Image (cartoon, rainbow, N blue to C red):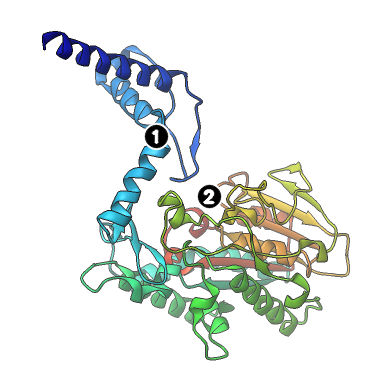
Amino acid sequence: MQRIKQGFVLLLGLLAALFLLVTYLGRREEISKFEYRTLAAHPEFSKESLLDGSYFRGWDEYISDHTAFRDGMMRSYLWLRLHVKKQLLVNDIIISEESLLPYLGEKSFGSDDYAALGRDAVERLEPIRQAVEAYGGHLLYYGIEGQSVVFRDGYPPYLHTHVDYYENCAAAFRAALAEAGFSTLYAHDVFTADGGSPKRYYARVDHHYNFLGAYKSYEAICLWCREQGMEIPIVEQERLQIHPSEAPFYGAYSRKLYGLSPIEEPLLIFDASVLPSYQRWDNGEQTDAPLLQLPEEGAPIYYAAYMGGDMGETVIQTDRPELPSILIVGDSYTNPVEALCVGSFNEIRSLDFRHYDQMTLTEYLESYPADLVLILRDSLNYVIPGGNGDLK
């Protein structure tokens, strides 16, 4: 019996050593495609990090992020939570009947003075309006309801979600824009103009609108441009042949469920060949990259298929000098609209100030005075004073 116990302990020790060896020698990933975050880097030793304990904490984080078979173990654990325990809240994702939604209950927002938050956000936009009007251009703010607001009835009634906070902030911001005289369009009005539900224009497993929502937004923006006297073509929806992707779509929320979401939907893609030829620069480097970037066969597809994902600066030129130019400013909601604008504008520039810091927007406009400056943002970020909410 004693030998059996010793053998069992030895076997456990060998298995643990083998597991650590595989972890140490295994391939290192820098980014988790499921969690959509940068994984912990190898901790650097220093006297200071040893004394303050950060060196050992760094090892804890590193081993946790790079443990062998980590994704497989996470998938197995999530499967149990989804299909055995039938949990409603998994990895900060609410699983409703028709969509996946973010859990927002523990988030802190600071001030509840909605009117002041709205006014402050509009004041940060005022220098941009003055810069655009100084050279005779047009400024348009296009606002989009957040996916969690549109599907708000999917939250259980007992769960505090802060969706009301977002709505109050958005209402105050819209009122402040109107009072200040900004030109605005809102996706809610565009999506419900025919009396239908706006839900049909949003992804159910991601926080963005779907490509139909992007197209309706592009079309509304182009029609507004025509009202301002700009003569621009509009690519007809039928020509784009919008259709579902064959590759499984891992949206921002379904990705956090490691592809095990009970709710699935395809990413809507389009025929990019109907758009004009162009030259393209990303972050100052000429890439001529495709407007729609599809994965290899068998691989999943992500929202980043549109334009290749977020870029600090993208410049596209189509060699049609008779058409106006556009500068688009915003977060990832802009990506599919940027692609569509290739069909209507001569030069398309886009800036994402979460990744771009070479110039302020007013400085950029001095060098590149676009005929249309389009600020395109979602309602969950209207009043946030950072990134694309801190323009100057």
Q: How many numbered discs sit on the rendered protein?
A: 2
What's the residue type where badge 2 is placed?
A: Arg
Instruction: Indicate the position of residue 53 as horizontal and vertical percent values.
Output: 26, 21
Looking at this view, name the residue that lies furthest to the front.
Answer: 1
Give whichever of 84, 245 is nearer the camera.
84
Q: CA distance from mark 1 to mark 2?
A: 30 Å
Mark number, residue 354: 2
Side of 127 relative to 135 (left or right): left
Q: Quadrant of the C terminus?
A: bottom right
Q: Residue at x 56, y 88 (%)?
A: 193
Name the residue at 31% across, 70% down. 155
Q: Is residue 276 left or right of residue 101?
A: right
Q: Amino acid at mark 1?
A: Arg
**Mark 1 = which residue?**
70
**In the rendering, at what x and y percent does residue 177 appear?**
49, 76
Sequence-wise first label, 1 or 2: 1
Residue 76 drawn above or below residue 241: above
Residue depicted at x 68% and y 81%? 224
**Numbered disc 1: secondary structure:** helix
- Would you call the spot at circle 2 few (<14 residues within 10 Å), some (14-19), or many (20 or more)? some
Asked if residue 6 lies left or right of residue 189, the reply is left
Picture quadrant where residue 267 is located: bottom right
Q: Is residue 388 above or below residue 66?
A: below
